[in-house]
Amino acid sequence: MRRLRGSRRLRGPRGRLLAESAALLCAAAVAFPLYWMVLSAFKPEDEVLSEEARPWTAHPTLDAFRRVFGQQDFGRYLGNSLLVAVVVVVASALIAFLAAVAVTRFRFRFRTTLLVMFLVAQMVPVEALTIPLFFLMRDLGDVTGVPGVGLNTLGSLILPHIAFSLPFAIWMLRGFVRAVPESLEEAAYLDGASRARFLWRILFPLVFPGLVATSVFSFISTWNDFLLAKSFIISATENSTLPMALLVFFKDEGNDWGGIMAASTVMTIPVLVFFVLVQRGLVSGLGGAVKD
């Protein structure tokens, strides 16, 4: 009886008010750094460097954004980041979808071992693999001789990010594929559908929310990457990505914090646009899979 009374209190107006207040506090804590970043991007330089921090500005200016877009090859860096992120998202989603179908619908040796390896690979930090990947990308470019593969190329960023995105994506999509009843697959075969048609016409739309959720992870990790871009793009600065453009505003005589905040704001816009485009699928993907 005491437990029932406690649960009723939590479900009542007071419990709802506490839950909403906690949610608002969490949202404010998350949004405040973003607000301060955008505010600093529009502040004049003297206010940015002022020791008196004010959460507003009476004289907004676009000087910091002019300095950002006035930097040489900033547009090229932005295009490189978009290209790498789009390729990684599309390729990892397709590969993860096919792999999730394979480990869920087919029985083969070492299947469980393969799934455990996916989890182990997800636990290894990127920093521990940077040096081995550096030598791998160097040797891969020398041995294959394929254009766009090797150090100082966008391929040296695309291939590792696909590899890092696959374990999480396969493990997550496995649950979505398993949730699709096998009776649906058998009915499709009885109606004359081939395996390929079932995969792309029936199964793919059903697990699409899971693909969206994994794509968000792939996009964010690729878009914000600085470590691999700094390690693999050595001399070919024309293949640098957008996080590398922030280094221009770090100077010996003093950091351009207004430019740093403006460039960070520009970097955040594609992420927000991506979230707006996929928010419905993301909510469905995080909420659960298809019910029988």
Image (cartoon, rainbow, N blue to C red):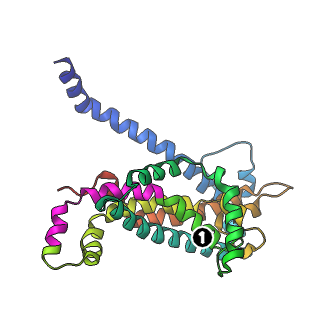
Instruction: Check residue 181 for magenta coloring.
Output: yes
Instruction: Check residue 262 for magenta coloring.
Output: no
Frontmost residue, 208 versus 188: 188
Q: Which residue is drawn at 37% across and 68% down?
A: 98
Frontmost residue, 47 versus 241: 241
For the view shown, which residue lies furthest in the front direction? 109
Q: Which residue is drawn at 19% across and 22% down?
A: 5
Residue 74 seen in the figure: no
Q: Name the residue under label 1.
A: 81
For the view shown, which residue lies furthest in the top direction? 2
Determine whether the residue tagged by mark 1 lies in a helix, strand or loop. Answer: helix
Q: Residue 235: horizontal and vertical position, in percent?
A: 78, 71
Q: Residue 148: horizontal and vertical position, in percent?
A: 64, 78
Residue 166 seen in the figure: yes
Amino acid, disc 1: Ser
Which quadrant of the figure contains the N terminus? top left
Mark 1 Cα within 10 Å, few/some/many (few <14, many 20+)? many
